Image (cartoon, grey):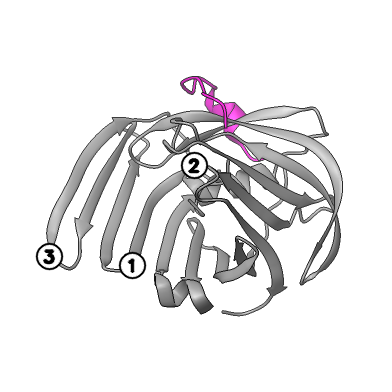
C-alpha cells in the first residue's frame, strides 16, 4: 500500500511516445528519509534513494516497521527499480518480509516486445507462486518512477495529466491532479507545497478502495515532503512525512 502513490477508474494508455519525455529536471542523486504514521502512532521508517547511472536511474525504497507495530507485525520490505533517461521502467524487484510472509517479486519490462513479465516467489518454500505476462505501451513507469515523473510536471491547481503506470499485472494511464496550495509542516521543516491526488486504487492498479495524496514543494526541486494513503475505516490512514535528507 505504501508503494502506491494514488482513486478513479482509468482508461487504457494511448498517449504517443513523444508525450512521455519528462518536462523538468531530476536530481542526480538524493536520499530521503520519512517517518511512517498509522492511527496517530509512529509505525515505522522509510528511506527512498535515487541515483543517476550511465543508462538512466536506479531507485531503492525501504520500509521498516517500528515500536508497537513492529512487535505486533514486523515488516521489512525493499523495492528497487531501474529506469532509462525517459523514466521508462526496465525492471523492478520487491522483497517482502511481513510477519511469516516472505516473497520476492520481479518484473521485466520489454519495450521492444511491449510486454511486462511478472514472477512472484515464496522465498521460504522456494516455490513459484505466480507468473504472467501483459501488454504495455512502449514506455511505462513503475510506481516509484511514476512519482519522479510526477515531479517533472508543472501543473497548477485544477490541472491534471496522465502517467503510464504498471505493476507487472496491470498497465494503465493514471490520472494525476494538482488540487491546491498548502503550507505543510514535517520534521524536516515547513514547506510551501501543491497537493496532488493520483488515481490507482479502486481496482485500477490496486483493488483496495482508497485515495493517495502527494505534497510536492513549489520550488524547482519538487520535493515530495508528505505522502498520505487513505484506506477503508478498518485500516485507516497511513502518512509519510519527510524527516531529513542524507545518507542511508
List the residue tagged with mark 2.
141
**Does the CB distance between marks 2 and 1 fall below 8 Å?**
no
Would you say residue 53 sits in the magenta stretch? Answer: no
**Does the CB distance between marks 1 and 3 fall below 8 Å?**
no
Few, some or many residues within 10 Å of mark 3 (<14, 14–19, 20+): few
List the residue tagged with mark 1.
97
Q: Residue at x 32, y 69 (%)?
A: 99
Q: Residue at x 80, y 28 (%)?
A: 158
Question: Which portion, as a residue range, is magenta?
Answer: 7-23
Q: Is residue 211 above or below residue 137?
A: below
**Does the CB distance between marks 2 and 3 fall below 8 Å?**
no
Disc 3 on helix, strand or loop?
Answer: loop
Quadrant holding the C terminus? bottom right
Separation of marks 1 and 3 at Cα, in angstroms: 14 Å
Q: Residue at x 48, y 68 (%)?
A: 62
Separation of marks 2 and 1 at Cα, in angstroms: 24 Å
Residue 125 badge: 3
Give how far across and how far down residue 1 sits, in percent.
48, 51
Separation of marks 2 and 3 at Cα, in angstroms: 31 Å
Amino acid at each position: 500500500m505504501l508503494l502506491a502513490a494514488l482513486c478513479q477508474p482509468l482508461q487504457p494508455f494511448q498517449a504517443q511516445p513523444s508525450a512521455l519525455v519528462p518536462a523538468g529536471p531530476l536530481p542526480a542523486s538524493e536520499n530521503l528519509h520519512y517517518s511512517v504514521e498509522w492511527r496517530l502512532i509512529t509505525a515505522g521508517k522509510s528511506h527512498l534513494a535515487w541515483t543517476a547511472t550511465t543508462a538512466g536511474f536506479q531507485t531503492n525504497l525501504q520500509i521498516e516497521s517500528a515500536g508497537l507495530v513492529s512487535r505486533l507485525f514486523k515488516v521489512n520490505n525493499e523495492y528497487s527499480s531501474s529506469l532509462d533517461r525517459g523514466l521508462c521502467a526496465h525492471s523492478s524487484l520487491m522483497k517482502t518480509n511481513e510477519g511469516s510472509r516472505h516473497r520476492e517479486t520481479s518484473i521485466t519490462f520489454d519495450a521492444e516486445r511491449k510486454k511486462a513479465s511478472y514472477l512472484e516467489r515464496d522465498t521460504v518454500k522456494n516455490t513459484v507462486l505466480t507468473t504472467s505476462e501483459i501488454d504495455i505501451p512502449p514506455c511505462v513507469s513503475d510506481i516509484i518512477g511514476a512519482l519522479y515523473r510526477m515531479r517533472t510536471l508543472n501543473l497548477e491547481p485544477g490541472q491534471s495529466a496522465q502517467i503510464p503506470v504498471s505493476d507487472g499485472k496491470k498497465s494503465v494511464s493514471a490520472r494525476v491532479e494538482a488540487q491546491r496550495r498548502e503550507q505543510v509542516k514535517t520534521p524536516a521543516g515547513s514547506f510551501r507545497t501543491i497537493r496532488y491526488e493520483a488515481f490507482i486504487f479502486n481496482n485500477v492498479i490496486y483493488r483496495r478502495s482508497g485515495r493517495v495524496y502527494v505534497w510536492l514543494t513549489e520550488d524547482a526541486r519538487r520535493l515530495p515532503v508528505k505522502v498520505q494513503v487513505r484506506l477503508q475505516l478498518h485500516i485507516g490512514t497511513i502518512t509519510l512525512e519527510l524527516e531529513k535528507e542524507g545518507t542511508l
